[in-house]
Amino acid sequence: MSTLLLITSAPTSIYAWHALGLAQALKTKDENFRVFFYQDGVMVANSLQWLPDDQRSLTHEWQKLNIRLPVCVSAALARGITDEQNAQRHQISQYNLAQGFELVGLGELADAVQSAQRLIQF
């Protein structure tokens, strides 16, 4: 069964951590799943986030999964997150998309929804 994890919660939300936990479990069980970061969920892709040493980084935990990490480009840009290509296109002086994350359009979400047998939103 293929699963789409639609992450719309900010990284500070417990729901964002639950999404990670489910992704880790699905990967461990070798289940077919995809993720998509949308709305406030895109903030996990900001490489400029700082956390105290005693806190785990949700960004780093997603990166450790070594899976595709698509992020809605419009939602990311609206929240100050961009890659080098979009920074140049929109005359933004810097870029801050975390390594391993990829800015994509909503067509990717539509495709993921259509091909998934179940969708779980966090």
Image (spheres, helix red, strand yellow):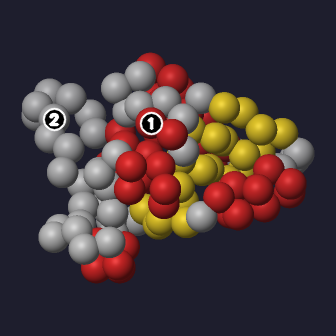
Q: Name the residue under label 1.
A: 40
Q: Does residue 84 appear left or right of residue 42 in this picture? A: left
Q: Is mark 2 on a helix, strand or loop?
A: loop
Front-most of residues 48 and 32: 48
Question: Of the residues under marks 2 and 1, which one precedes in the sequence?
Answer: 1
Front-most of residues 29 and 55: 55
* Amino acid type for the residue under numbered disc 2: Leu
Front-most of residues 65 and 91: 91
Q: What element carries label 1?
A: helix
Residue 78 coordinates in the image, percent (x, y): 39, 49
- Mark 1 nearby-residue class (10 Å; few <14, some 14–19, many ≥20): some
Residue 25 coordinates in the image, percent (x, y): 62, 38
Above or below, 46 relative to 58: below
* Amino acid type for the residue under numbered disc 1: Asp
The total number of labels drawn is 2
Residue displayed at 69% across by 55% down? 109
Q: Name the residue under label 2.
A: 51
**In this orientation, does residue 6 appear?**
yes
Residue displayed at 22% across by 68% down? 92
Q: Does residue 118 appear left or right of residue 103 in this picture? A: right
